[in-house]
Amino acid sequence: MRMLKKLLNKSVVITGASSGAGRAAAIEFALCGAKLTLAARNEEVLDEVAAECRRLGAEVLVVATDVTDAKAMISLANAANYFFGRIDVWVNNAGVLAAGPFDEMPMAMHEQVIRTNLLGYMNGAHAVLPIFKAQKRGIIINNISIGGFIPMPYGAGYTASKFALRGFNEALKAELTPWPYIYVCDLFPAFLDTPGIQHAGNYTGKVLKPAPPVYDPRRVGKAMVDVAVRPQATRYVGSVSVLLKLAHAIFPQTMANATAGMVRTYLKQADEISKTDGNVYSTVNYGMSPYGGFGWPGKPRAHRKYIAAAALVGLATGLWMVNK
C-alpha cells in the first residue's frame, strides 16, 4: 500500500519496455498507479504492453524510440513531459547483447552494442536532466546488470559498454551533488530469465543460455519501484550479484579466466545454430514476454541451492589461490 500511495499518478518513463525487465517494470509501476510513458523500437509490441498496463488502471503513452538517436530521446522526454505535465522517474533499461570471439564479430556490431548500452543511457540522462533541473527533482534508474563489474569473455563489446556505463554514472552522481533531490540509482541484477539472450547477436554458432541461477525479471521491476520510492545510489538485485562482485574484487583474473573456461566448455557441448545479428541493429518480433523460459516464472527468489553452489565455488577459488 505504501508503494501504491507513493507512486500514484507519478510520471514514469521506461525505455526497453517491450520485453524482459522493462516489460516487467511497466507492469509493476502500473500496479502502483503510475502514469507510464513506454519506449522501445517495436511499436506494435509496445501497444500490447500498454494495453496490459491500461487493464491494470494505468494511463499510458507509447513513443516508439531508438535510444541510440539522441534527438529521438529528447523528443521522448518532451512528449512525456508535455503529456503528463512532468517526469518523476526515468528508467534507462534498453540494452542489447552480442556474443562471439571478439575478432570474428564485425566491429560495427561492437559499436552498436556500445551505442545502445552506453550512449543510449547517456542520451536518456541528457534528455531528462534539463526537465529534472527545472523541476528541481527527479529520479534516474539505470538497469546496468552485474556485467558492470564482471567481465564477460566472448562478449567484449558488452563488457566495454557496461564498465563504461558504471563509470559514467559515478561521474554523473558526483556532478549532481548540488541538486539534492535529483537521484541517479544504479541497479546490478544477476542473470535474469528474460528473452535478452534469445535476442542476442550470436556469432558463436551455438545456442546460448544464461548461467544459473536465473532470477525472475519481476524482481528487477520491484527493485525499480522500490528505488523510485526510496532512492539508492547502488542496488544489487539477488544474492548472486553480490557474491560475484566480491569474488571478482578479490580474484579478478581468476574469475575472468574461470568464466572464459566455463563459456568454452559450454560452447563445445551446446547445439549448433546459425549465426545471427539478433536485435542489435533492428527490432525483432519474437520472444517479447518478460520471461525467456530459462527459469520458473513467478518465483521471486533464486533457488537457494544455486546460491549455495556459487558461495562454495567462491570459497574453493579462494582456497586454491591461497594454496597456489
Image (cartoon, rainbow, N blue to C red):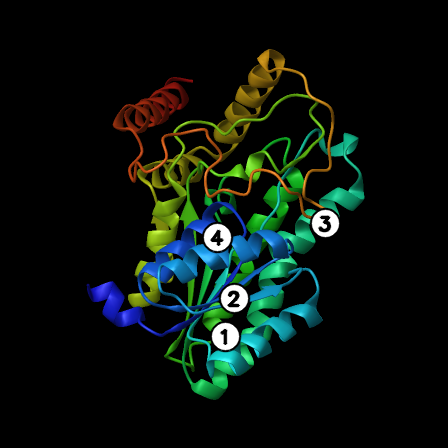
The residue at the point 42 percent across, 85 percent down is: 136
N-term mark: 2 or 3: 3
Give the labeled residue for mark 1. 175
Give the labeled residue for mark 3. 112
Distance CA(mark 1)–CA(mark 4): 27 Å
Q: Is residue 76 positioned above or below 30 on the image?
A: below
Tag in front: 2 or 3:
3
Query: Which quadrant of the view contains residue 125?
Result: bottom right
Observer-nearest of 123 and 37: 37
Determine crowd level at label 3: few under 14, some 14-19, many 20+ residues with C-alpha closer than 10 A: many
Whether residues under marks 4 and 3 lie with C-beta atoms below 8 angstroms apart, the answer is no
Distance CA(mark 2)–CA(mark 3): 23 Å
N-term mark: 4 or 3: 4
Whether residues under marks 1 and 2 lie with C-beta atoms below 8 angstroms apart, the answer is yes
Type of amino acid under label 3: Gln
Residue 275 drawn at (x, y percent): 74, 27
Give the labeled residue for mark 4. 22
Q: Quadrant of the N terminus?
A: bottom left
Give the labeled residue for mark 2. 171
